């Protein structure tokens, strides 16, 4: 069972750290722009930036990008269940809803 | 027989503890499988805590509230969350993850011939990076202690309202995880000073690093969902 690994160097990790910092700065900066906060893109953009940061840490710092697929399954399986649980509970308790166009 | 080949990238080679597959039925280290399964279960724990916070968000009848709110008397009350302080603590935790990955790299490459990468200079010192990681984790905890104290002084406790209950439970659980992580890192640092961490310790440092990065990714989610989204 030969496994080919190519791992990052310290400078790659430092670049990843710089990218994470940059995204965090953008997130906080967006929070202080009233026009951005009141627009419909504010929440989706924050969620996307957060997801990107999450993925970068998991793939590079936790080495999941280079690791065995069993580890990927052990992490992504529960993560998917966790995210679906959050979404389901948000619907169940009326925090989010889908507009059907039907008026009552 | 399980073998692992390592390739050189543009800046130098680096290998990981899992590469030397132990003689197990999966060819993978059982400790590492266990820690990934543990992290998976922790994802669901924090999902339940985050869900609880989000469900109770905006349902507190009395203040303080997280963001600017109009109270029952028609007055606009400012939010209690301190975004600049939390942004600083978020940056500290992100940098601790960087220090942790450098510590792991230093341990993995200990005793190897000098070449570009983890085998020389500052990057070769596992003691330095373990210390920096533990220090940054402690700074994060100090930020959290400051935030909790400020909230209590402003009248928000775990018993005040739904926001207080769900907020302190969620961030308190996270803080407890960070505390465990700092103690774990200090233990590794003590071992490093006592006898030196070497190739046989790579898996132990690796699982500590996985735990530490997980604590970091949970905070990435909390920072956005609790602090930034109004």
Image: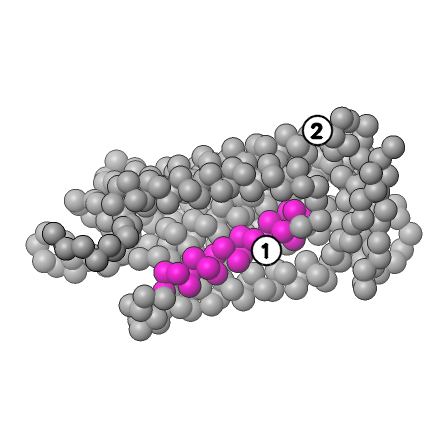
What residue do we see at 54% from left, 66% from top?
A22
User: Is residue B20 rendered magenta in the image?
Assistant: no
Is residue B183 in sight in this rendering? no
In the image shown, does B8 or B149 lie closer to the viewer? B8
Quadrant where the N terminus of chain B is found in the figure:
top right
**Place of residue B20 in the rendered image (x, y in percent of width and height, measured from the top left):** 82, 38
Q: Mark 2 sits on what residue?
A: B30
Is residue B214 in sight in this rendering? yes
Mark 2 neighbour density, 10 Å: few (under 14) some (14–19) many (20 or more): few
Marks 2/1: CA–CA distance: 25 Å
What residue do we see at 77% from left, 27% from top?
B24
Q: Mark 1 sits on what residue?
A: A56
In the image shown, does B132 or A66 lie closer to the viewer? A66
Mark 1 neighbour density, 10 Å: few (under 14) some (14–19) many (20 or more): many
User: Image check: B53 left or right of B78?
Assistant: right
**Place of residue B193 in the rendered image (x, y in percent of width and height, measured from the top left):** 76, 39
User: Image check: A53 left or right of B105?
Assistant: left
Provide the chain ID for the residue under circle 2. B
Magenta region: A42-64
**Place of residue B56 in the rendered image (x, y in percent of width and height, measured from the top left):** 27, 42
SS state under label 1? helix
User: Image check: B92 left or right of B26?
Assistant: left
Q: Main secondary structure of the magenta part?
A: helix
């Amino acid at each position: 069972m030969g496994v080919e690994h190519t791992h990052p160097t310290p400078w790659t990790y430092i670049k990843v750290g710089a990218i994470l910092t940059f995204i965090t700065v953008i997130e906080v900066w967006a929070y202080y722009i009233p026009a951005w906060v009141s627009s419909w893109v504010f929440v989706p953009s924050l969620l996307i930036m957060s997801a990107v940061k999450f993925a970068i840490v998991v793939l590079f710092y936790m080495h999941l990008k280079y690791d065995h697929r069993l580890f990927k399954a052990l992490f992504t399986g529960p993560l998917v269940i966790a995210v679906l649980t959050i979404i389901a509970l948000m619907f169940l308790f009326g925090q989010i809803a889908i507009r059907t166009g039907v008026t009552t | 027989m399980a073998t692992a080949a390592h390739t050189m990238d543009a800046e130098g080679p680096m290998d990981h503890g899992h590469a030397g597959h132990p003689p197990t039925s999966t060819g993978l280290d059982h400790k590492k499988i266990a820690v990934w399964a543990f992290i998976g279960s922790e994802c669901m724990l924090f999902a339940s805590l985050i869900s609880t916070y989000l469900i109770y968000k905006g349902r507190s009848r009395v203040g303080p509230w997280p963001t600017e709110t109009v109270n029952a008397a028609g007055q606009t009350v400012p939010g209690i969350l301190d975004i600049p302080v939390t942004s600083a603590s978020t940056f500290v935790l992100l940098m601790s993850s960087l220090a942790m990955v450098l510590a792991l790299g230093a341990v993995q490459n200990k005793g190897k011939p000098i070449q570009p990468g983890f085998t020389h200079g500052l990057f070769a010192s596992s003691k330095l990076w373990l210390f920096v990681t533990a220090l940054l984790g402690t700074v994060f905890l100090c930020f959290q202690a400051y935030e909790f104290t400020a909230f209590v002084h402003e009248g928000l406790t775990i018993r005040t309202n739904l926001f207080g209950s769900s907020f302190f439970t969620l961030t308190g659980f996270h803080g407890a995880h960070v505390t465990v992580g700092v103690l774990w890192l200090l233990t590794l640092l003590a071992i490093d000073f006592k006898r030196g961490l070497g190739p046989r310790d790579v898996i132990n440092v690796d699982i500590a690093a996985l735990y530490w990065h997980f604590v970091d990714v949970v905070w990435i989610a909390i920072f956005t969902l609790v602090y930034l989204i109004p």
